[in-house]
Image (cartoon, coloured by chain):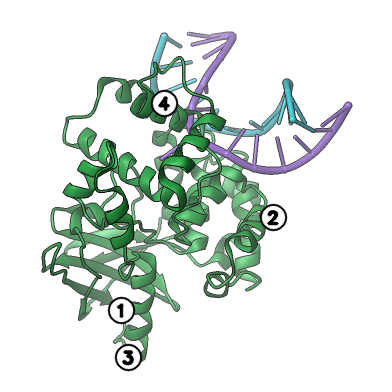
Chain colours: A green, B purple, C cyan
Amino acid sequence: MAKVVNLKNKTSLTLHPKPPFPFDSSMYKPGHFPSQDTAWVKGCRWQTMRWNGQCLGLKFINAGTAGKPKINLEVYSRDKLTTDYTNSLVDEINYRYDFQADLSDFIEKFKNDEQLGPILQKWPGMRIMSPQSLYEYLIISIVLQNCAVRRSVSMMQALFESYGTLLDYDGKKFYCFWKPTVLNEVSEDELRGLKVGYRAKSLKRISGPFAKGEIDELELRNKDKEEQRKVLIDLYGVGPATVGYILFDVFKHYDELTHISPWEQKIYSKLFFNRDLSNPVSEEKLLKFFNQRFGRYKMLAVHYIWEDLFWKRKQGQGPEWLEELIGL
DNA sequence: CATCAGGGCCCTG
DNA sequence: CAGGGCCCTGAT
């Protein structure tokens, strides 16, 4: 069982995302994998975070409007935090949640687009996000591979219980990720015991370069997209699908769309071409279509459409065919 | 009970 | 560059 740490120290900070900023669609993504390090209710997101050696419990509270955004951030920690620490934390949060992004050009370009226009009206300036570090995102990607969501959730749970830290803060409990050194030192057999299957090897081999400091996420952010791609694809267990997600979510390349998985292919074929699930448009044709229509914003545009679909589903207004595809 | 596919990726030929 | 195999689970 994971150890439980009670975070008694609370620091209050204020964040100012660049307007326009719709809080809920930016801070909660029904289309993302549901990990056990977070929760959301309207106007509020809880999220654990490992930063500079400390496990933190974050609570983001909406205290503004889309036009005049303001977030009250409560940071729960075991130790008292220094100003230097909270400054670096705020920088990191701004990066991970893309708070300072200027999306005015994107909004202007597509406000009258047939599919995108209505969503931009509803959620002008919605951000992309990756609350996790690059390493943590990689772990999630590995447990996502070649299985349905239900199993991914149970693998993640098992990993958190064995190697994570359960944080107790604000009357709630969420898991916090482990340091890369932890998995680097366990045996593949031990990992297999958690029923992660052949993914045990990938989990271990991905942890290595991070444990040894061979991959520095902050440094990698300053490289160009193709250099980032090369570093990622060289990791064992990381292929084109995973790299695509990371270049977009973690490194914020709004134009990264080079691979469409079969189930995404079915969804886009239905949404844009009204094709039956059994008769999807080819990946190549879809890629060409997105490129022509959305140019350097193609993945961002797809994200808006994707999240709109999954928000509707969450509210019980999703299309029938989507349930068929997800098959939970 | 058996069989199969699943939000990939690696390795082989 | 195509295709088999991989761990395991839930669905059939």
In the rendered structure, the answer to whether residue A188 lies left or right of residue A249 reads right
Q: Could you tell me if the residues under marks 3 and 1 are in contact, i.e. CB atoms within 8 Å?
A: no
For marks 3 and 2, the one nearer the N-term is 3
The image's mark for residue A281 is none
Residue A117, picture quadrant: top left
Judged from the image, the secondary structure of the residue bearing numbered disc 4 is helix
Residue located at (13% from left, 53% from top): A42
Judged from the image, the secondary structure of the residue bearing numbered disc 2 is loop
Query: Which dot, 2 or 4, sits closer to the camera?
Result: 4
Q: Are marks 4 and 3 on the same chain?
A: yes
For marks 4 and 3, the one nearer the N-term is 3
Residue type marked 1: Arg
Please identify the quadrant where the C terminus of chain A is shown. Answer: top left
- Mark 4 to mark 3 CA distance (whole Å): 51 Å
Of all chains, the one bearing label 3 is: A
Q: Which residue is situated farthest in the bottom direction here?
A: A83
Of all chains, the one bearing label 1 is: A
Residue located at (47% from left, 21% from top): A280
For marks 1 and 4, the one nearer the N-term is 1
The image's mark for residue A269 is 4
For mark 1, what is the residue? A78
Judged from the image, the secondary structure of the residue bearing numbered disc 3 is loop
- Mark 3 to mark 2 CA distance (whole Å): 37 Å
